[in-house]
Image (tube, rainbow, N blue to C red):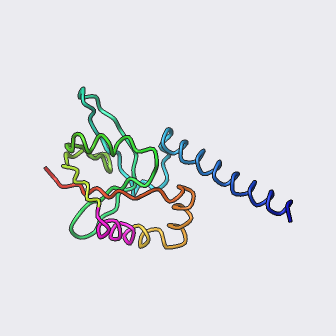
Amino acid sequence: MRRIAIGAAGLVAGFLGLALVLEAYTAVSQPVFQRAHEGVLVTFDEAGGRHQTRLAVVGDDDAIWVQSGHYFRGWYERVLANPEVELERDGELRPYLAVPIDTPESEAHVIELLKGRAGPLRYYVIRTLLLFADIKPVRLDPR
């Protein structure tokens, strides 16, 4: 029984370690997965420095959404400090006003958009690998 408990604890620790490594890798390297469903969000720090972050972009009839679903979310903190951002998609750079909407309704809406695009199974696999970090929806309004 003790060997089973140690094995299970090792499995959990291994999964957590793998998930944290994948999370850090994604935050640092910003790999390209599906160009049609992503964009590069340009945020600005207090000194006016530009920061580019590759993000999944989801849209519905009314809005364009990005979401912070990682624990390493420097771009989200910069949006809170300065909501004037730019989004590059398909080689075109446009200015937006980032509107963080941290409500259960907006989170549920963005989750449904993500599930609709990727499918529920893939969505939950990705969320599991990201250790179910809170989703912070941000609507991008044209300016």
Please report the residue visible at 83 percent of the width from the left and 63 percent of the height from the top: 4
Left or right for 22, reference 1:
left
Q: Quadrant of residue 43?
A: top left
Please report the residue visible at 75 percent of the width from the left and 54 percent of the height from the top: 10
Look at the image and tell me in which quarter the N terminus lies: bottom right
Can you give x and y, in whole percent of width and height, for residue 126 in the image?
53, 61
Position of 106 relative to 73 (above/below): below
Please report the residue visible at 69 percent of the width from the left and 52 percent of the height from the top: 13
Can you give x and y, in whole percent of width and height, for residue 92 in the image?
26, 46
Can you give x and y, in whole percent of width and height, for residue 19 in the image?
60, 51
Q: Quadrant of residue 15?
A: bottom right
User: Among all residues in the image, which is located at the extreme top?
Assistant: 47
Please report the residue visible at 34 percent of the width from the left and 62 percent of the height from the top: 58
**Between residues 115 and 74, which one lies in front from this camera angle?**
74
User: Among all residues in the image, which is located at the extreme front?
Assistant: 2
Q: How many labels does the image show?
A: 0
Is 13 covered by the magenta stretch? no
The dominant secondary structure in magenta is helix
Left or right for 86, reference 34:
left
Left or right for 55, reference 130:
left
Position of 119 relative to 13 (above/below): below
Q: Quadrant of residue 110?
A: bottom left
Q: Give the range drawn in magenta.
A: 103-113
